[in-house]
Image (cartoon, rainbow, N blue to C red):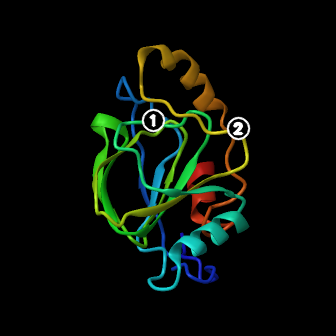
Amino acid sequence: MSTHADAPAGVHAVEPERHLFEDDGVIPNNPRLPFLVYPGALEPGGDPAAVCEAVFAANRWDRSWRNGIYPFPHFHSTAHEVLGICRGEARVRFGGAKGVVMTVRAGDVVVIPAGVGHQNLGASDDLLVVGAYPPGPDWDLCTGEDGERPRVLDDIAAVPLPPADPLFGEDGPLMAHWRA
């Protein structure tokens, strides 16, 4: 797959890293859609939060927010999520107890499929994240409690594919990876 030379202003044309996580018994993860990491996708300088909001919205991931990442294991069963790391860094566990721990830094963008767990294990004081969701149901907040499981498995399976890659649009790498 080639990189996208027509990347929007403020975005580097990068290919994402892929991770597919299995259900760990607590965090269901997503059996068919890989978690994607776009390392260093945001160009340094300027206002990366404004760049994230504009680029995400232009690609129909327009339900956005600014904050950090929750310090407890959680996932969303009704929506996919994109996180743009605009300032600082954080050690984050993705995929539950059997997933991966990685440090995300200013400039990185991650796309989290519905069901994939994420947890902030520690962050710099200046961490700023812009998150967004594509069109579809409102996001929920699930923590892997026993009573959630039957409902969330059906919800995860029903979440539609987004209309576009949050960085590179309808022809972006997410579309190829998630339609494969």
The residue wearing badge 2 is: 137
Label 2 amino acid?
A: Pro
Q: Quadrant of residue 5?
A: bottom right
Q: Nearer the viewer, residue 100 or 172?
A: 100
Q: Label 1 crowding class (10 Å Cα cut-off): few <14, some 14-19, many 20+?
A: many
Q: Earlier in the sequence, mark 2 or mark 1?
A: 1
What is the x, y in percent for residue 147?
A: 48, 14
Q: Is residue 170 visible?
A: no
Disc 1 marks which residue?
29
- Which percent across, then down, holds residue 131? 54, 56
Q: Nearer the viewer, residue 2 or 136?
A: 136
Tell me the amino acid under the disc marked 1.
Answer: Asn
Q: Position of residue 43 (x, y in %)?
A: 48, 82
For discs 2 and 1, the disc positioned in front in the rendered view: 2
Question: Residue at point 70% right, 38% down?
Answer: 137
Pick the quarter of the image with the N terminus: bottom right
Crowding near the residue tagged with mark 2, few <14, some 14–19, many ≥20 C-alpha atoms within 10 Å: few
The label shown at residue 89 is: none
Calculate the distance from the C-alpha at mark 2 to the C-alpha at mark 1.
18 Å
Q: In screen coordinates, is 126 left or right of 160?
A: left
